[in-house]
Amino acid sequence: MKAAPFEYVRPASLAHALELLAEPGPETRIIAGGQSLVPMMAMRLARPGRLVDIAGLGALAGIGRGDDGIVIGAATVQAEAERSPLLAAEAPLLAAALPHVGHVQTRNRGTIGGSIAHCDPSAEILLAALALRAEVELASVRGSRRLPVHDFAVGAMVTAAGDDEMLVRVLLPARPAGLAIGAAVREVSTRAGDFAILAAAAEIGLDGDGVCRHLRLAVGGASPVPVTAGAAERALLGTRADAGAIREATRLVAPLLDPWDDQRASASYRRRVAPGLLARALETAAGRARSPEE
Amino acid sequence: MADPARFISTRRRVREDRRFVTGTGRFVADIRLPGALHAAVVTSPHPAARIVSIDTRAALASEGVVEVLSGAGLPDLVDPIPNALDTPGICCYPLAVDAVRYVGEWVAVVVARTRALAEDAAELVEVRYRELPFVVDAETALDPSSPPVHPAHGSNLLYRRLFSWGPVESDFSAAPHRLGFDLAWGRSSTVPVETFGVVASWDAGRDLLDIWASIQMPSFAEQVASCLRLDLNQVRVHYDVDVGGSYGVKRGLKHTVVAGLLARRTGRPVRLVEDRLENMAGGDMHGPERKFRVAVAFDDDGMIRSLKLRALEDVGAQSGRAPLQLGKPVSAIVGAYRIGSVAYEAICVSTNKTGQTAVRGFGMAPTNLALETAVDRVARHLGMSRFAVRRTNMIRAHQFPYRIPSGSTYDSGDYHAVLAKACGLARLDRLLARRAAARAGGRVAGVGIATCLEPSGGNSSFEALLNPKNTTTTWPESCVIKVDRTGLVTASIATSTSGQGHETLTATLIGEELGIDPDRIRVLHADTLSAMPGNTPVASRMAIMLGGAATGAAGRIRDRALAIGAHLLGLAPGEAEWSDGAAVAPDGRRLSLGEIAQVAHREYHRLPPGITEPGLQATHVYQVPTGGTLPDADGRGQMYPCYSFAAHLVYAEIDRLTGTVSLADYVIAHDCGTVINPDIVRGMVIGGAAHGIGAALYEEFAYDGQGQFLSGTLADYVMPTAHEVPDIRLVEHCTPSPLTSHGQKGVGEGGYLGAPAAVASAVNDALAPFGVACLDLPMRAGTLSDLLATATEQP
Amino acid sequence: MSVPVTMTVNGRAVSDTVEPRVTLVDFLRDHLGLTGTHVGCEQGVCGACSVLLDGVPVRSCLLFAVQAGNRSVTTVEGLDDAILQDAFEETHAMQCGYCTPGMLIAARGLLSDTPDPSEDDIREAISGTLCRCTGYVQIVEAIALAASRLRQDERHG
């Protein structure tokens, strides 16, 4: 399991990296953490002719506040995001998703942008980003554009990025003010740390009366791209999100799913279990919103 | 033996560990020979196909490539891989000749300057296939109209025999109750973290093939030599290689034949270290895949009178030694129970799947699952406690030695005491209360119980049982000890080691015998040409067999040293005693081993009359206790000398929604007789149980309906991590074996023999209130969730 | 094809030329002769190849040596962590020893962040490293033992 030969470039700047991407010639791939790409190269399922290593580009790293939310550089390492107090405070759902991503050794290399760009249907970061209605910024020598993650993630392992485009930033909307926020990710995997068979993400905001005023729900692993559960969100907004209501509302996610059979679970399993798993995530999130210290 | 043991059974450090924590172990991939070439394999993408042509020209022209070998012409160069049953018409070579029989089968091998260049060239080997019909299911394969995996054999049936021991039919008709069920053990294996690797080097000046391999296999050098058409003393297998885990499977015979052939042809050392893809698909290390039909006849009190067991084993496309794994269970076919008669039908078929090899317990773990499931079902049928039914059926302490219907005699044991210890440590009453509380809270909870026998120290009599041409009645192990002029002791053993601590074992027993500090004894791993006979660490045999050899050799050293010492002290033979590493006179005068050794090596004139050999050295080749006989015409015979025993208890909850199983309060009570090193024994038992948990819940080599292999990576073949294996607590019981040097029995396999049954027992106890059962391993979350979803909860 | 690479390995600066496709673990083993780091799967699952990269555990099969340029790598040979290594011996936290370097690296990563880990912390830290021999129990014990001895050492040292 040795990768096929390739050329390696460490660009001096983002502009340089984008120029390299725009050059005609052998397939050029971006590498940052490489935690998904390298095994595919080792198995020769991916064989880029050139790797452009963006890990050292300061312009692509770091987590900060933007005009209307949180901005995460695409090459920000997952472990750094996991330790970020800003993310914990302002994007609790993404913070809740991170410990589920791989293992400590892979989170020490893998990046936020890399995971989203890989676009695995069961990936937790993509799931959280979709639930949060995040946007991504794509850059190329032609300029840059922002688009919702929802439009970026086109299918399993397929994105809307052009061959010359690079995901440079992830933009998370600001959390709603004045609400008690709770977030949780629950997943089913054969082993902790494996790719999820199913994953569910929930973020809830309760007002002073305990009424749900903000809700973000999504399910991964049961369709080519994780789905946001809009109908369930609408059904619960304005309610107290008690257990019965949650159970009813999360059922609404089932028709949105497009699951498959594989070695780990059947399509019917995914369809049957997903609503319940989403309910669990939401109940945990609601519990956290009600008593934040727990 | 009169003095209490000083070193045996005490917590002493395991000497092998030092090199591993400092990164100075020497595994096969660490062995670097100048000029070595690296091999990569071209494998079959089809479950069955005719090879139309192989074009190696582009590969040969690729950068760094030295040689490309394919199956074409291979029969002119090597003999087929031996087939333990001598099944007619089955002829397997290391590389496919004319036809491929499973996905992943080796078709060609490229050797190049680096592994990466070899892989580059392997992609350029052009193989044209014509696809053939295939079969991947064992029951289908039994059908005479199914596509034959080996057409020359005429069918897919490799072995079928119905053994009958005792009045089965009359016991069945006389019993007030009968029940039966089917059960399946999924294809899994032990999958060590290190793949198999071999380095071969041909020494033309000496006409000698040197082999370093991550090997754990009896008769390895013999088979390599025979396949390569070399004299046995032209092959030297170096045992001084750390093996990165094996648990039975490290048997890379085809790898070694290929590497040896290529080393000889290229005149350069050749490394063939499997990568993980080669290992999983074509390494021929899959384990048992077995379907059972079980029936038992029993009394009102749960006493089981008779057992009928049909086992259908799917060995895949390479027969090798795999069918023999239906033989070992005969040695303990009734487990711990006083079942009076048994009918055992053993059936083996080939399918278009990867070859199977020996796995920890050599076929016992699946059979024990079938037996223990039967006992649980008897209890459920009668509305009795599973513990009570076991106590009723278990052989009683006063009944040992106890002969079972299939002919083996269990040496010793106290099964009731061990089961009681397990229940005590687990606090069974609290466990059952926890289950009740969980169930009352709507959760799906169960308590699992299983016992298992661990036949140990055997003489490979399953070979003679299944293949009448095989007349093996001994399986010795040996130890050579020399005491140098300064009185320091060096022992040499005839095996490589894969984590069992053989150096520690050997040093401990020699130290005990000679009354000297084991830490000052050096233990070397010899090579096959310099070693005395040995059969490698299989069959839970080393504590018994290497222990016996080391003790025997050390005893000879002690007797010789004492004789010399007594003479030097001016005493008659028998007047001195051996104590604390010295010959001691009644008046307290002492001569140390070092002083005696100096005389033995240098001062011949001072040796006592009758001692004519200078120096101080001894060899002991230890015969298997109770060995020496062949099975009778009904297949009855003494298969193993010693029988360890264990009882496993575990609490399980199944997530009602997701089907995920979580285990807690895992307790094992075990009796392996005298424990030589407590930390080693503990690790072996717990580690074996972890394997068993994997087999029960997660691990499977899966194939789809097209015969494609689905488990080629460690992401797809799911082995438990530290999250899936709970804390496991042990309690020991010691019933010494009357047959071994210190009362020890084997311990390498028991954890794996008991755990699958215990976990299955817990899961099925949890499912029982819902009126459903899971009798297929692995019991995946998806399956359990589906079962729970369709079940109607019973009041 | 080969390109120059410079990094610090076990405190020593090393420079070599490598093909970009050479992984860090192959560079350590084949170019530097540091065979203490083991290869188990080359696809980032087993953890046997774990090393410290700038002090944190990573899988050395999942990065190319060129990616580690100008960074600092610690392997089991340079771990110099007597208390941790001794604790692994004390509890016999291994059998075949093949996963041991990866386990030690994972443990070092944990203890650098979490001097007083719970059993769950320990299990989480080693959950990315497969051991097929031990069932993990004695490894968990070793790391807990090392943690307590390191804390004692800290207090008295």
Image (spheres, coloured by chain):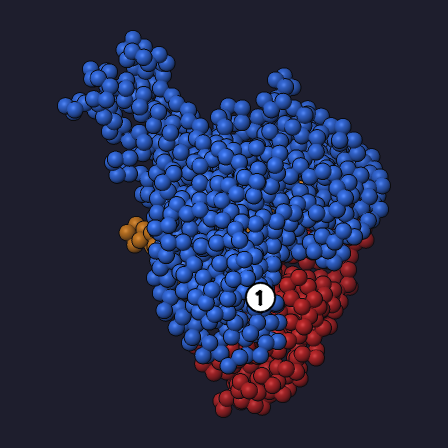
Q: Picture quarter containing residue A215?
A: bottom right
Would residue A183 be seen by someone viewing this image from the given angle?
no
Which of these two is toward me, B346 or B668? B346
Picture coordinates of residue A98, whole percent (x, y):
55, 66
Picture coordinates of residue B372, whole percent (x, y):
50, 59
Which of these two is toward me, B429 or A235? B429
Secondary structure under tag 1 reads loop
- Chain that is coloured orange in the picture: C
Residue at coordinates 60% horizontally, 57% vertically from top-left? Answer: B292
Q: What is the residue that sits farthest to the top in this orientation? A: B605
Q: Say whether residue A236 is left or right of residue B570.
A: right
The residue where tag 1 is placed is B774
Picture coordinates of residue B151, whole percent (x, y):
78, 43
Residue at coordinates 48% horizontally, 26% vertically from top-left? Answer: B532
- Chain that is coloured blue in the picture: B
- Chain that is coloured red in the picture: A
Q: Picture quarter containing residue A201?
A: bottom right
Identify the amino acid type marked 1.
Answer: Cys
Q: Say whether residue B220 is left or right of residue B112.
A: left
Q: Picture quarter containing residue B32?
A: top right
